[in-house]
Amino acid sequence: MIYYSNASLDRPHMTFVGRWTPFHKGHTTLIDTKRKQNPDLPVLILVRSTNYDAYSPQTRAEMIKEWMRENHVVGTIMIIPDVEGVYWGRGVGYKLEKVEVEEAVTKISATKIRKGIGNGKVDWAKQVASEREVGMLKPVTAQIIEKGMVVWLTGCPSAGKTTIAKALYEKIKETHPFLKMQLLDGDVMRGTPIAEGLGFSPEDRALHIRRMGHLAKMFADHGILVIAAFISPSADIRAEIRELIGRKRYVEVFVNASKTVRLARDVKGLYKKAINGEIENLTGFNAPYDRPISPQVVCHTHREDWEESVKKVYEAIFD
């Protein structure tokens, strides 16, 4: 299976096969040695699909892809079945050759790197292929790359969900540029065909949030970090979504602000309309909101600034 390619597939490639778990400087030295000898040839890196390694083949392939992009390496990555042996007849039409590298390079050990990650020692970071890979190898980020994650922000209108969600998105984009991300905002999604025909009755709201939960899961299933900001007033529906996505890859964030502060902010003018009788069933005003009982994070936006709130959510994800 071709995982990634930025090369013409009808060109001969220099082939390298391995587990690459993780991809380290010994591997890059091996590949770069042949690249210097054949600068016009793309590389073909074959990732063995094993079920006994610390990282999935997709995660390993993603690490190699980041190294290729960062170093402008032209080539192709393929995920292949595990290899029992390599056999050939009298004339295979291509070379089988050992690449000679310095002894110090041969002593770089993927096993030692994995042990270093496990026991918290920092010296392992110097031996992996790139700085980005250091972040990718940490258990939390490796799990996101492989299985995705959903950060679900819930709270009443004008509590600050969208502000926190957007700031969190930008912070993660800056610190973890290798992660695939998707922002789902309540107001934006209400304006899409997904919400077409839905009003704001309790039944329609429940259906809309269920749809958003399934959409978030679909993204997460492809290794995407989803930041979802929805009022989602029903505790039962939120629990349903948590079970749908899976507790290990779901972070619930309660964005809390006092009613006085929310009415003073009234960013969209909803509370004013509700006071004037133009809106019925406004959550947190004349319609109920079920406060989360045990969310992973609570952001008190009426007494903490946005940076503090974003920091709390960020640490809940990565620490």
Image (spheres, grey):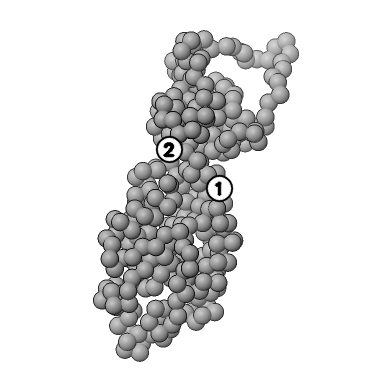
Work out how far the residue at label 1 is from the one at label 2, CA to CA, in angstroms: 16 Å
Q: The N terminus appears in which quarter of the rendering?
A: top right
Counting from the top left corner in percent of width and height, residue 80 is at 64, 32
Counting from the top left corner in percent of width and height, residue 15 is at 57, 22
Residue ID at (48%, 10%): 103
Q: Quadrant of residue 299?
A: bottom left
260 relative to 5 in the view: left or right: left
Residue furthest to the front in view is 119
Secondary structure beneath disc 1? helix
Of residues 310 and 221, the one drawn nearer to the viewer in this rendering: 310
Counting from the top left corner in percent of width and height, residue 167 is at 33, 55
The disc labelled 1 sits on which kind of residue? Lys
Q: Which residue is mark 2?
A: 135
Mark before the other along the chain sequence, 1 or 2: 2
Q: Is residue 286 above or below residue 175?
A: below
Of residues 207 and 254, the one drawn nearer to the viewer in this rendering: 254
Counting from the top left corner in percent of width and height, residue 66 is at 45, 34
The disc labelled 2 sits on which kind of residue? Gly
Is residue 232 visible in the rendered image? The answer is yes
Secondary structure beneath disc 2? helix
Residue ID at (57%, 22%): 16
Q: Quadrant of residue 203?
A: bottom right
On residue 147, which mark appears?
1
Is residue 184 visible in the rendered image? The answer is no
Residue ID at (43%, 82%): 287
